[in-house]
Amino acid sequence: NIVGNFGTVFVDQSYWQSAIAAKPASTHKGYLLGGLVWFTIPFALATSLGLAGVAFQLPITASEAGSGLVPPAVATHLFGSAGSIMMTVMLFMAIVSTGSAEGIAVSSLVAYDIYRTYINPQADGKRILLVSKIVIVVFGALMGGLSVALHGMGLNLGWVYQFMGTAIGSAVVPLWNMLMWKDANAIGAVVGVWSGLILAMITWIAVTAAQFDEITVDNLGALEPNLAGNLVAILSSGLIHV
């Protein structure tokens, strides 16, 4: 969980764009406040509603719990339809906010760092805006399709959340090195990221096979294989880069 969340911060372009766009005098205050809220709200909701679900002995299956359905079940049990509405509004606001930020971040990367840099250096504002709009639509469709595909494969929210560190954790230390280490080089960072990802995937699958004697979707989502993959991702990439 910790490794995956490091990855979501360091690899998320929307954080970088927000920091660059904000006024220097306000950036540190905003990020400190945001960091406190980012921890406090999920912790408070997960702890209170999770314990309430156990205390009320609600008929929630393991699959439903893994899909993140404990909070709405508890809210509905406590407040009826009003609880359902409150959870729906909260989720809608969170998803729309996050989705819009990610769409803008990806479109900016493609439009400025790829299209204008390598494809059309003479592109004017209208052309860049058009490319950005196209990327937002394509990115949104791809993410929607990926969500449907993951759901179809039976990969719930908990499974994806644990696997996240294995998939993106290898980028954390090389990015930190590029920011804070004057002797860091781009080639070493790229090699570290990809090598760390490959080693993390191998470790994740190998630990699953060693622990359960077979590789299944449920076994790959277990705690120990994901812990091993997460740790190898974040540690090996840093060592390789150095």
Image (cartoon, helix red, strand yellow):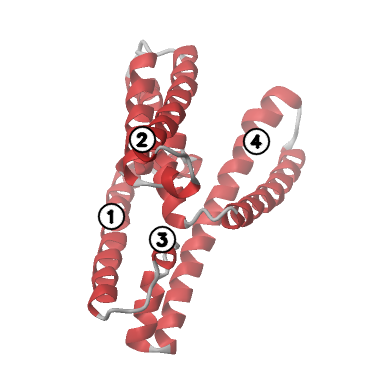
Cα separation between marks 2 and 3: 19 Å
Do the CB atoms of the residues marked 4 and 2 lie less than 8 Å apart?
A: no
Given residues 198 and 90, the one toward you in this image is 198
Above or below, 242 against 129 in this view is above
In screen coordinates, is 50 left or right of 59?
left
Q: Amino acid at mark 1?
A: Phe
Do the CB atoms of the residues marked 2 and 3 lie less than 8 Å apart?
A: no
Cα separation between marks 3 and 1: 20 Å
Nearer mark to the viewer, of 4 and 3 = 3
* Neighbourhood count class around disc 4 (C-alpha, 10 Å): few under 14, some 14–19, many 20 upward: some
- Specify which label sits upstream in the sequence, 2 or 3: 3
Q: Which residue is mark 2?
A: 230
- Specify which label sits upstream in the sequence, 3 or 1: 1
Cα separation between marks 4 and 2: 28 Å
| Element under disc 3 | helix
| Element under disc 1 | helix
- Specify which label sits upstream in the sequence, 4 or 3: 3
Q: Which residue is mark 4?
A: 110
- Specify which label sits upstream in the sequence, 4 or 1: 1
Residue most extreme to the top: 183
Q: Which residue is mark 1?
A: 39
Above or below, 77 against 171 in this view is below
Nearer mark to the viewer, of 2 and 3 = 3
Q: Which mark is residue 66?
A: 3
Given residues 129 and 154, the one toward you in this image is 154
